[in-house]
């Protein structure tokens, strides 16, 4: 800041005016806060990609694995939210995840280990 104070005549004028005049201080502070906010808002509106046409195009060109992951995530989220609505204890979900296990939908068998997949099954799923 000393560089500005020592070298810039404009900066010294602004500092003197804000120190001596409360209305000028309020106006300067408003300009420093509002102008960047308005510019940022305009940039966000111009670069907004939430148009239905663009979303439809992106979904149409999506890779199959992306679509499958979206479906799986939606199912998992639905299951988790259902458990929360029913006020079930979900701590065992985290314990199972730490052990590398996954929960089943069978309410009597809450946890089971992740099954090992053979190379043939993995290549079959990728096709």
Image: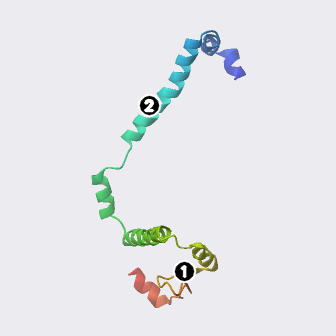
- The answer to whether residue 122 is left or right of residue 46 is right
Task: Count residues near mark 1 (Cα–Cα under 10 Å), then give few for <14, some for 14-19, many for 20+.
Answer: some
Residue 105 at x, y percent in the picture: 46, 82
- The answer to whether residue 5 is left or right of residue 60 is right
Quadrant in the picture for residue 26: top right
Whole-number angstrom distance, CA of label 2 to CA of label 1? 48 Å
Residue 7 at x, y percent in the picture: 67, 16
Residue drawn 44% across and 32% down?
A: 39
- Give the mark nearest the N terminus, 2 or 1: 2
Quadrant in the picture for residue 41: top left
122 versus 95 height, above or below: below
43 versus 21 height, above or below: below
Which residue ends up furthest to the left in the rendered image? 53
Front of the two marks 2 and 1: 1
Q: Do the residues under discs 2 and 1 have CB atoms within 8 angstroms?
A: no
- Coloring scheme used: rainbow
Say which element carries label 2: helix
Q: Nearer the viewer, residue 125 or 114?
A: 114
Quarter of the picture containing the C terminus is bottom left
Say which element carries label 1: strand
- The answer to whether residue 108 is left or right of residue 20 is left
Task: Count residues near mark 2 (Cα–Cα under 10 Å), then give few for <14, some for 14-19, many for 20+.
Answer: few
Residue matched to label 1? 102
The image's mark for residue 38 is 2
């Amino acid at each position: 800041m000393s560089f500005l104070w020592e070298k810039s005549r404009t900066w010294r004028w602004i500092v003197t005016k804000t120190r001596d005049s409360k209305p000028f201080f309020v106006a300067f502070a408003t300009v420093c806060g509002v102008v960047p906010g308005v510019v940022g808002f305009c940039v966000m509106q111009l670069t907004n990609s939430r148009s239905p046409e663009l979303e439809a195009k992106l979904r149409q060109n999506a890779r199959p694995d992306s679509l499958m992951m979206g479906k799986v995530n939606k199912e998992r989220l639905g299951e988790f939210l259902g458990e929360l609505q029913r006020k079930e204890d979900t701590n065992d979900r985290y314990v199972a995840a730490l052990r590398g296990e996954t929960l089943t939908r069978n309410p009597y068998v809450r946890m089971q280990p992740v099954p090992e997949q053979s190379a043939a099954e993995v290549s079959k799923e990728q096709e």
